[in-house]
Amino acid sequence: MVTGSGGPGVAMAAWSVSSAAAAHVFLLLVFPRVSHAQTFSFPFLQPESCGHNQYFDISALSCVPCGANQRRDARGTSCMCLPGFQMISNNGGPDFICKKCPENMKGITEDGWNCISCPGGLTAEGKCHCPTGHILVERAVNGTLLSQATCKLCDENENSFTVANALGNRCVRCEPTFINISRSCTCSAPNILTGGLCFSNTGNFPSRVISSARYGDLGMSFTSEWFAKYLQSSAVACWVYANLTSCQALGNMCVMNMNSYDSTTFDACRLFQFIFENTAGLRTVHSISFWRQNLPWLFYGDQLGLAPQVLSTTPLPTNFSFKGENQNRKLKFVAASYDVRGNFLKWQTLEGGILQLCPDTETRLNAAYSFGTTYQQNCEIPLSKILTDFPSPIFYDVYLEYTDENQHQYIWAVPVLNLNLQYNKILVNQDSSSSKWLLTRRIFLVDALSGRENDLGSQPRLIRIATQISLSIHLVPNTKNGNIYPPLITIAYSDIDTTDPSSQSVKVSFSVKYEMNQGEAQVQTDIALGVLGGLAVLSSLLKTAGWKRRIGSPMIDLQTVMKFLVYYAGDLANVFFIITVGTGLYWLIFFKAQKSISVLLPVPTQEERLVTYVGCAFALKALQFLHKFISQITIDIFFIDWERPKGKVLKAVEGEGGVRSATVPVSIWRTYFVANEWNEIQTVRKINPLFQILTVLFFLEVVGFKNLALMDSSSSLSRSPPSYIAPYSRILRYAVSTVLWLVIGIIQIMFFVVFYERFIEDKIRQFVDLCCMSNISVFLLSHRCFGYYIHGRSVHGHADTNMEEMNMNLKREAENLCSQRGLVPNTDGQTFQIAISSQMRQHYDRIHETLTRKNGPARLLSSSASTFEQSIKAYHTMNKFLGSFIDHVHKEMDYFIKDKLLLERILGMEFMEPMEKSIFYNDEGYSFSSVLYYGNEATLLIFDLLFFCVVDLACQNFVLAAFLTYLQQEIFRFIRNTVGQKNLASKTLVDQRFLI
């Protein structure tokens, strides 16, 4: 007893300390302390590497010597006594003791525990040997060990009909066929012994049976050990005795031979067909004429045109829907499975990857049977894994389970199209015409059995694998309730020569696709293409007529035809674009939003037509874009300077040593400034191209709009990582891309026009204001006799002035203390469309030829002084001529101003020809922007969109498409600015070095 001031608390503490110490000592004994120098590696050994007197210790994973008088057993993981030695102790551990038997009892009992005398001699294992037909008896009925073993002959007489079993330890009844044929347990001639069964040779069954397995992929055929042992016996047992498992086994061997039929040889399928034809008197199963009683259902018949009737005559009596109360979006496939010997295994659903060789999560595997989800699975599997997982083939009869209106459950047989099937040595199922197909029923995944040549326990010489399995679902035409025709399983097998299974692999795939008749949609597309194409011809003719009038040429020549073709290319590009966008939107909306299924997405082969249309739209739109691009960089332009000299100055005269009076020169910097501004606005657009691309990419990749293009029924913008991601539909990718691109582009244009140009900056109108402030007008000819005029003549008379005077002028203009800026007095109209007469154009060309005779300013600056002065004189002549033309000085080349008719505005052409006088059309819409990017936004927007979509359709990559689209935009922008500068310099005598 503990006493003192500590009391019970001290006692408890002492007990805790002693308990902890004891636990620590226990842990040290059980789990010794790890040394820092200790390693955790040891030799890698396998059971077969152990010696004859060693066994593989499954605990230590190493080879351990057997004890005295012992040797390794057959498995190699334990020891056994040598012949002539009995076991004394064996508890399953290493303590294993053997003792030598006495001389008069050298035999060992079957269990190895006792010694016994063997009058019939010994086997190699030291056990008693009995003659054939005898069984070994070592113990009495009550289990007492006999001093001497005896061999008993089984009674084969009629009362017993017994024979020794395979182990030789029991007498069992003879196989029934022996008794039925010979009334004994022997099958003597002339009867036939095959597959352990005895048959009479007096029947009408074919005796010459071909036991070969055909491997068409490798072009070889050899005798299969499995067929040699069991083909004839299974066929005869099925034919003579209607043995159910034998009939199933015969059917399995026919399926292993690819359901191939040859009327000249009695192979598995020929034997099956023979039995089928000679059992016509038996009833059918479930009233199906192809399914005979006692036989498996393997074929649908060999009549021509039968396959289309099976596949597209009778719809399944069930409906499928994506949404709603009666939602039904699951394909419930079930399969009756059989082993190779014909035994029924079980009913099983195909979920969980029963027919899918590629490993994956259960969620992704089961997604294959979600209605409307196009499924694609590909992988490469080591051949060694296939041999391990499929030592014996399993056969499947596939059905689709459904519920009728009365909630009764039924199953519908799913036909199979075996691409390897040969009918009289012809691969009929690879024909493009379905009327020649021969449909079958039973399938398997891997056959590693029929390829064994001499021994069923050896490695197969060849292996046959279902490398392609495709499930096709066809929608009934014009259905509104999601009715489908019977699904079709298309399967292709590959024959693999197993030379080195450890290094060989095989590629396999599993897919589910949905189809519908696209004939009506194609007809509607053709009608739309024809109607819109006709309108495009009319539009192109009007544009060509307008072009002819604007160039002042009434003749129809080759240039006219080429111009018509270019205009038609642009209009036809718009037709293709409208049709493709409409088609894409149709599939996107009606497929994703439907409740009861009425449409299914086109399969990739059916999408080729739309992809071709998109390609045509892009090619034609590119031609139109290049035509506009070249036209814009080759326009004629001249800046009319209205500024007049202010007084005179004294100027030194070269070579004379004196001075003389000269007018004050007019500054050229205003012209340079206006030219630079013109060069700057050439590539101004109503949208920001970089923002356009980044925004589209953001919505596609980040927000997840690209998930709307997946070939499944989901309308969600996100997908969980564990779920199956269906392949993309090219039609839906195109539809989603075009919708986003157009919506974002239109929003940008509306924002630019409604808000940005009104409240922030309008570069087009600012350019017109700049011209007026600079006292410079722009005379621009986009065609020979048609162009645009921007009236920039200052209402203040001078623009080359100081800041104070300029501010005063602006103030006077704001307070309406001066005249208005318009060409016509008391009007504000500064921009005009002009149709000039031929005489006016000829005069312009004569002056312009002098202006550009030396190929522009760069050449002029390097030429002689006289030539330069001559060019300067030509420039001033042009400036004076155009100024006087605007001021109505030349009565023979005068002009008048009028408004365009509404129809003229709509058609984009002029009805009145400028015969004697030129015509200035009031233009409040600043249509001179048509020679700039600004006025061609629709063409640029559609061209960029089609470029983006074509790259994406080719690469299936939105990021790459966005990058390449931005790259081409920058390239064309650089070319436009560079070439535009050169053209501007050559047309206006502005030195290119001063253009930014």
Image (cartoon, grey):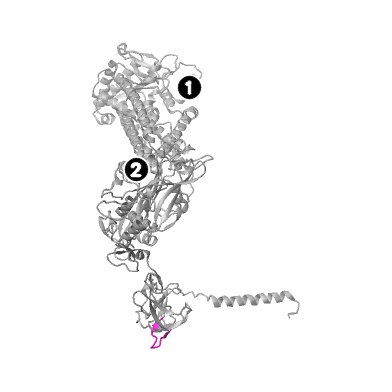
What secondary structure is found at the residue carrying circle 1?
A: helix
Q: Is residue 460 above or below residue 567?
A: below
- Which residue occupies the extreme front position in the image? 159
- Which residue occupies the extreme bottom position in the image? 103
Residue 227 shows in this picture: yes
Residue 453: x %, y % from top left: 29, 63
Residue 68: x %, y % from top left: 41, 84
Q: Decide whether residue 102 is among the magenta residues.
A: yes
Residue 415: x %, y % from top left: 38, 47
Q: Give the image quarter of residue 195.
A: bottom left
Residue 996 shows in this picture: no
Q: Residue tagged by mark 2?
A: 307
The quadrant the C terminus occupies is: top left
Q: CA distance from mark 1 to mark 2?
A: 88 Å
* Type of the residue with mark 1: Leu
What secondary structure is found at the residue carrying circle 2?
A: helix
- Nearer to us of marks 1 and 2 is 2
In-image side of 716 versus 942 (left or right): right
Q: Residues within 10 Å of mark 1 (few under 14, many from 20)?
A: some
Q: Decide whether residue 670 is among the magenta residues.
A: no
Q: Earlier in the sequence, mark 1 or mark 2?
A: 2
Q: Residue tagged by mark 1?
A: 810
